[in-house]
Amino acid sequence: MIYGICNLSIVPIRAEASDTSEMTSQVLFGEHFTIIEKEKNWSKIQLAFDDYEGYIDNIQFEEISEDLFHKLSLIDPIYSGEIIDFISSSTNDLITIPLGSRLPFYIKDQFYINTKRFKYEGAIFTGTLLKSEIIQKAFTYLNTPFLWGGKTPFGIDCSGFTQMVYKLCGYNLFRDAKQQASQGEVLSFIEESEPGDLAFFDNEEGDIIHVGIILNDYHIIHAHGKVRIDTLDHSGIFNADIQKHTHKLRVIKKIV
């Protein structure tokens, strides 16, 4: 088995082994993964964090040993806490990293990938935070443009948004809305929910296609065009800008 780690700021995960294929997600700096299949130019990977699978370019990651992979999987992760920041390497390279990048074996402003040492002096997030912190982290992404497959403050989709917010608070969500809807405890009514719970929405065929984070006073923050705040009622999401419902409520889940 071969293992890898992302050594660039943001790497696209493709549905197929091609630069023109749909981007289904992203790998952020410091994320590690299993390489399921390695071809000449592309590798099919499975992320350690959420088991998500897809293709990345072979020149956009670094291989790591099995021992290092397992150590990374066992230790508590430490994530960068700035919208964007720089890390510097022992060879004087500068790399930009977005919010939620992983800093492997971070101690006193330094961390390592294989034998290369890096320095990072920004804010960090680690451990499990209080449920109230979920809302504060969600506001960090406010007005981020919608990007299918995105996971950063420069472009994010609905389930990437919920996954990243929960990740920064120390909780694991699956990558896609339909998968996230399988997690947690079902709540019968909006009145039972608390800020930080998740609301899921379906299409005419009954498939879960959207997710957002519930706020106080019947409001929701979600990625639709951009990360925005709208009204939530028993029918779904009501967009005051266009004066109509945009998403049909299917289920509310308590994760924390």
Image (spheres, grey):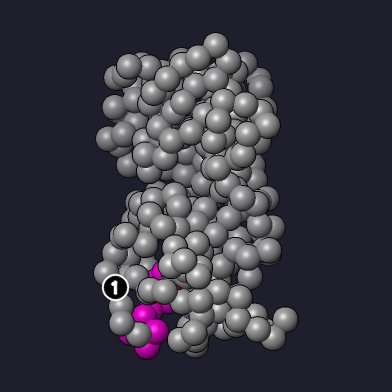
- Residue 240 seen by the camera: yes
Q: Which residue is drawn at 42% across and 74% down?
A: 250
Q: Residue at x 36, y 80 (%)?
A: 193
- Left or right for 85, reference 62: right
x and y percentages locating residue 23 in the rendered image: 60, 40
Q: Residue at x 39, y 51 (%)?
A: 174
Q: Residue at x 66, y 28 (%)?
A: 19
Q: How crowded is mark 1: few (under 14 residues within 10 Å), some or many (20 or more)?
A: some
The magenta span reads 190-199
x and y percentages locating residue 195 in the rendered image: 43, 76
Q: Which amino acid does label 1 sit on?
A: Val
Residue 36 vertical position relative to residue 28 in the rendered view, above or below: above
- 238 vs 66, nearest the viewer: 238
| Quadrant housing residue 29 | top right
Check disc 1 and report its element: helix, strand or loop.
strand
x and y percentages locating residue 239 in the rendered image: 65, 80
Q: In which quarter of the image is the C terminus?
A: bottom left
